[in-house]
Amino acid sequence: MAATRNVVVIGSGPAGLTAALYSARANLKPLVIEGLEAGGQLMLTTMVENYPGYRDGIMGPDLMSEMRDQAQRFGAEFVHGNVEKVELCGAYPFSVKTSEADHAAKTIIVATGASARLLGLPSERTLMGHGVSTCATCDGYFFRGQEIAVVGGGDSAMEEAIFLTRFATKVTLVHRRDTLRASKIMQDKARANPKIVWMLDSEVEEIRDTGKGEVTAMVVRHNKTQARADLPVAGVFVAIGHTPNTSLFRGQVELDQNGYIRTHDGAKTSIAGVFACGDVQDHIYRQAITAAGSGCMAAIDAEHFLDNIPEHLATV
Ligand code: NAP
């Protein structure tokens, strides 16, 4: 096994890269294990217009590349690949295993994010960032004066649909059942909004037009009558929930009832020396800027921990 690391960051979205930048600048020589989806959810976006400091916007992948280079400039090291196992309980230092190597770490910063659930249609994948979005806050502004659709029946779908009526002329809410999962108050707000049109018992079969590389319509099937309808829209917001990427940590770090890592007093988790930041511990804000901010907090918390490692943990 290689020398024990001060900090191993797992994940390379805005949270992980900001944690890497701050811990590199604190001279902690962090190792970042990038994960299979290196760069995180912003790699699936096109223009990002709400990241402060980029007056004219920046493409999501370019923003991530800038952040990675910035962290690297101060000495963060990057390895490709995925973490297969972590051992956080019992022995110290912690152990992080990838298919290539075993790493020992005095602190771990978990920044594995959450993945937006998708419908699973090939056209949805192809048009992601080109009219298909999983983030109304990020992309709603691009649909000023247009007709769009939101898919889902939970609180997120209601919230996104209501938010999107600020920009769109009409928002069709497409949900697979005739009852909504959303809380009564959110349902009532959405139902009271005259710009929201309901398409219940309806499933999306296809998003057009992959040939043109932009969204022009959705094919929706009514699952009771089996009737198919073409719904002309310029954008589709998929709001069917998120899955936090916490399977590695289950049974070791305390999670909340939805599977997100519980943090307290900044970025601390239930295990001293393990910190979490970004969407893996935040199901409310989910923004690049909030993830980056929490990555900074995790790095500072890790630095403080390393300054004063508790006595009961045998140091190496
Ligand atoms: P959610 O409550 O799990 O709802 C997901 C919705 O997507 C459900 O209506 C579900 O349909 C639908 N869905 C799931 N998979 C689908 C698929 N493959 N095809 C079509 N539809 C599918 O997720 P969420 O709305 O993101 O909310 C997550 C948590 O955050 C909840 O606890 C929620 O209350 C909370 N939240 C709160 C607020 C707020 O209070 N302001 C805002 C956002 C989120 P079915 O209903 O048929 O299963």
Image (tube, rainbow, N blue to C red):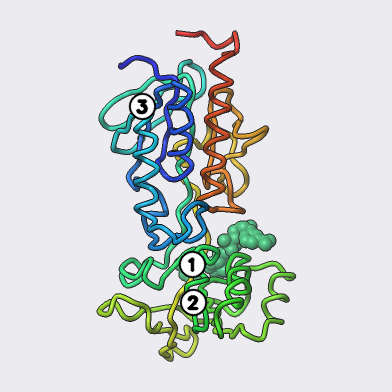
Badge 1: how crowded within 10 Å, few (<14), some, or many (20+)? many
Taking the spot 51% from the left edge, 73% from the top edge, the residue there is: 151
Image coordinates for residue 268, horizontal then vertical, percent: 61, 31
Image coordinates for residue 19, horizontal then vertical, percent: 48, 34
Which SS class for mark 3?
loop
Location of the N terminus (image quadrant): top left
Q: CA distance from mark 2 to mark 1?
A: 8 Å
State the residue position of label 3.
75
Whether residues under marks 2 and 1 lie with C-beta atoms below 8 angstroms apart, the answer is: yes
Instruction: State the mark number for residue 54.
Output: none
Badge 3: how crowded within 10 Å, few (<14), some, or many (20+)? some
State the residue position of label 1.
139
Pointer 3 or 1: first along the chain: 3
Location of the C terminus (image quadrant): top left
Q: How many numbered marks appear?
A: 3
- Where residue 126 sits, quadrant-wise, is bottom left
- Compared with 112, 24 (above or below) is above
Q: CA distance from mark 3 to mark 1?
A: 34 Å
Image coordinates for residue 29, horizontal then vertical, percent: 39, 23
- Compared with 126, 52 (above or below) is above
Q: Amino acid at mark 1?
A: Asp
Taking the spot 42% from the left edge, 64% from the top edge, the residue there is: 118
State the residue position of label 2.
143
Which SS class for mark 2?
helix
Beta carbon of the mark 1 residue lies under 8 A of ligand 1: no
Ligand 1 sits in which quadrant?
Answer: bottom right
Q: Nearer the viewer, residue 304 or 72?
A: 72
- Where residue 204 sits, quadrant-wise, is bottom left
Residue 94 relative to residue 75: left or right = right
